[in-house]
Amino acid sequence: MSAAKPEGSRATWRSAVGGSLATALLAITGVAAGADAPATAPPPAAVVFAQVGEVTISRQDYEAAVVSAARNKFYHGAIPESEMAKLRRAVGERVITDALLLREAKRRQIVADSASIQKTLDGYDARYKDNPDWQKQRGERLAGLRQKLEEESVLVQLEAAVRKVPDPKPAAVEAYYSAHPDKFTQPEQVRASLILLAVDPSSPKAAWDAARDEAAAIIHRLKAGADFAQLANLHSGDSSAAKGGDLGYVHRGVLPESAQQALDRLKAGQLSDPVTMLEGIAVLRLDERKPARLNPLAAVSDRANDLLRREQSETAWSALIVRLRKDTPPTVNESLYLPVLAAGASVVR
């Protein structure tokens, strides 16, 4: 990107649209593996993608971000045209937002962590010291990396500062708890027992029919007074057989759907009809049902406090971005959001 003012003029394209900052730069400059597969045709550098205050985001930098995002998301596979259109818009929104945030960081006089940046640069220099291409353009690439890392550093600090909200007051926590009972409710639990007549999934229909007949006979014996635990120990192929078929307490969603549906129809102490499961034919008994229960605020106050603070943090961050876009409306060349494919690129229609 180019800018009327050199400081804070390059937006940072970050992992929200694929890949780390340094990886993106190295991929664009050709050091990273796979840099021989551009996702879009190289555009004329003079074309402007967006104007954000005094910052001009060039088409060249926008397209470079798209290339890196496409590589991270699709590797070298075919890129569906509809997906590329979505990706181009997501990348555009990201670079514009970062340009706005960099201007805000500059206004707040946030300074990059130079020691951490130098350590990172030394690491890249050591990693690519034997790469002839790196050595040929080492100075230029280190300078580019430094600028990217400085931008990332101030953006991280800005986000941390904005998201640092005070602990909610007790009244606010109580109101949040009351407004979101679903977040503090212990889901329904059932205690059930199981006799599983194991059948290999690939077995013929006759094997499944035989197991179903055996299950019906077991149910008949149970209704006549036979002991469930003894029959489970004798016939069940499930690991619960050693415990007399006792599955313990389970939440909804833990058991296979067919088993859950069978238990939903039962009252405590009742037996199911034979139930077909992936592993075989089952006989289930509902031993106890614990209904969903809202935990008292005293028991979940820490969780309520954390959830509310996280929500307020997200609200503060979103509000900043909305305000920045309102105060400095970007001008965008939206025609560039349409896919621009390189010659020979694969498109799935």
Image: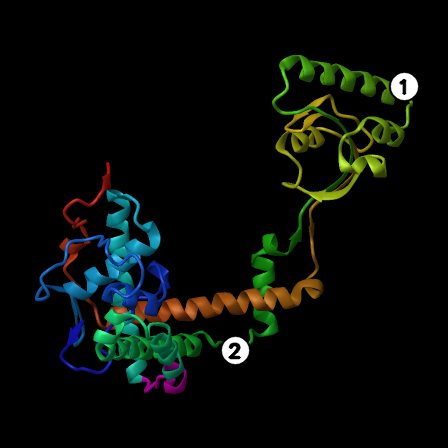
Left or right: 125 as drawn, with respect to 296: left
**What SS does tag 2 mark?**
loop
Judging from the image, the colouring scheme is rainbow
Report crowding for label 1: few under 14, some 14 to 19, many 20 or more residues within 10 A (C-alpha): few
Rendering coords of residue 292 (x, y %): 69, 46
Instruction: Name the kind of residue labelled 1 in the image.
Output: Ala
Left or right: 270 as drawn, with respect to 323: right
The residue closer to the viewer here, 296 or 60, is 60
Q: Main secondary structure of the magenta part?
A: loop
Question: Does the magenta portion include 109?
Answer: yes
Instruction: Name the kind of residue labelled 2 in the image.
Output: Pro
Q: Check disc 1 and report the residue beneath it.
A: 224
Rendering coords of residue 334 (x, y %): 16, 56
Residue for point 63% across, 15% down: 204
Q: Check disc 2 and report the residue beneath it.
A: 166
Q: In the image, which residues are magenta?
A: 108-117
Instruction: Indicate the quadrant where residue 2 lies.
Output: bottom left
Instruction: Indicate the quadrant where residue 258 lies.
Output: top right
- Please determine whether, in this image, residue 64 is positioned above or below residue 6: above
The residue closer to the viewer here, 318 or 152, is 152
**What SS does tag 1 mark?**
loop
